[in-house]
Amino acid sequence: MGTTLWQRTAAALGAAVAAGELTAAEVIESHLARIAEVNPRINAVTQPLAEQARARAAELDRRRAAGERLGPLAGVPFTVKENIGVEGVPTTHGLARFRALRARADAPPVARLRAAGAIPVGHSNMPDLALGGMHPRSELFGEKRNPWHPGRTPGGTSGGDAAAVASGMAPLGLGNDSGGSIRVPAAFCGLAGLKPSHGRFPADHRIGPDDPTLASQLIPVDGPLARTVGDLRLAYEALAGTDPRDPRAVPVPAFAPLPPAPWRVAVVRDPGGLGVHPAVDAAVTAAADALADAGHTVTELPDVPRLAETLDAYGHLIMTEFSLAWPHIGPVIPEGSRAYIEMSMARTRPVDLAEYLRLTGVRLGLRRAWAELFTRHELLLGPVFTEPPVEPGLESSGLAGHQLVTGAMRLCTATSFVGLPAVAVPGSVVDGLPQGVQLVGPMFREDLCLAGAELVERRTGVLTPVEPAPRP
């Protein structure tokens, strides 16, 4: 443990604070200093919570001095995406309209991480209302940069957390994912990221008193980002469970016995046959080799179940609901953030009620097809994004950029729609940029995805924290 405190893992920090080898105050001060040093270069943290974090650290230190046993994440700093509530802090969603929208209570995942001893140190940047595209650029807080390369996006929409974790501002970040918004930033920033099964973690995605509509109930999930798979596992264990505020969360055990070796691992290099960049394909090869060398059976498959049908159903369910809300949402979003969602609505027109209802049945059939796949394979390995990290705002630059970005995240989109767990992990570094892969597993087998990702991590190594690259 000879490294600077902000360089250490969440596991090492939590163990040291719980054992009295470090104080939570020391840990927090190290990370607050790191935020002050590097955040001006990448603009990942939007609302630093310095005084709240110091007060929480002092409380933890008092409790430990009194002989109380602390949780596994004692004193561990974490960032929180701007659309997840932290008690007493504005949940702005990046918009001036919500500048004063203070959270009355912690959102369920924030509360669960706090219960394990972790301390929020800041909100993190995101696109306006998570609708402005993949690149985290917001009306209130401006543009965020990838710490690896200022000419590449950190990905989104949870890219603020990814950039903060990758640059050492916190060892954990809390974001959400409805089609790649945790996994893509993890891939672009050289991190591990967990998209949990639908119903694994409790969440609260309301803006105001009304609950979201069906597609927004079934698809988005909150989840963690970390520099190591081991830290991701600690966060997963803290986040899993039920909460009365979210009846969707089910009491499934967080861990189950792992299948006997060798595991049957399916590899899909190019979902849908639309093309994959050689750098990404090389990362998939490296990950497949790591799993094979660990003794598992790796088999190439031509495709995932019914991908085109999945993407079509996903788009039409979401855009049909969204088109009904757009007259209310559109005026809130700045003009500069409207291009992405307007192109999305133009490409995928709303459907009538009969077709919408048919698509709800299609979703069940797609889930069944994936469940059948996992009777023959324990895990599926594939790309997170079929291109290397792209330039900021490509998805909003025009139809070609929009199609490239939405197509490149197609495996993320499909697995989000059917609600499966997946762990993103770096597979390699090519031309100075990380290339991510993901391990997808059966429902509620996040533990299996984590175990597979750890085997890949042993081959690739831990890539972060990094010093942010200077601005051009």
Image (cartoon, grey):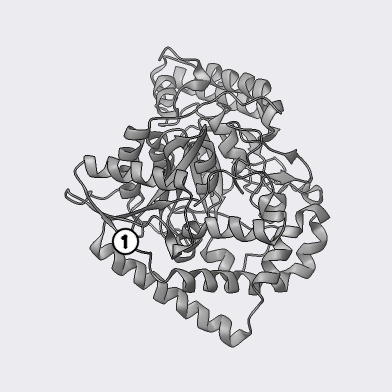
Residue drawn at the location 46% of the way across and 28% of the way down: 74
Q: Is residue 23 above or below residue 245?
A: above
Residue drawn at the location 59% of the way across and 33% of the way down: 164
Quarter of the figure that contains the N terminus: top left
Q: Is residue 401 left or right of residue 370?
A: right
Quarter of the figure that contains the C terminus: top right
Residue 368 falls in which quadrant of the image? bottom left
Say which of 189 and 448 sits in front: 189
Q: Where's residue 244, x and y in %?
A: 50, 57
Question: Which residue is farthest top?
Answer: 2
Badge 1 local density, few (<14 within 10 Å), some, or many (20+)?
A: some
Disc 1 marks which residue? 301
Q: Is residue 3 above or below residue 227?
A: above
Question: Which residue is farthest front?
Answer: 278
Question: Which residue is farthest bottom?
Answer: 354
Q: Where's residue 451, x and y in %?
A: 30, 43
Residue drawn at the location 46% of the way across and 35% of the way down: 429
Say which of 156 and 102 sits in front: 156
Would you say residue 179 is visible in this rendering?
no
Residue type at the position of mark 1: Leu
Say which of 79 and 53 sits in front: 79
Say which of 134 and 73 sits in front: 134
Q: Where's residue 10, x and y in %?
A: 45, 29
Q: Is residue 448 above or below residue 161?
A: below
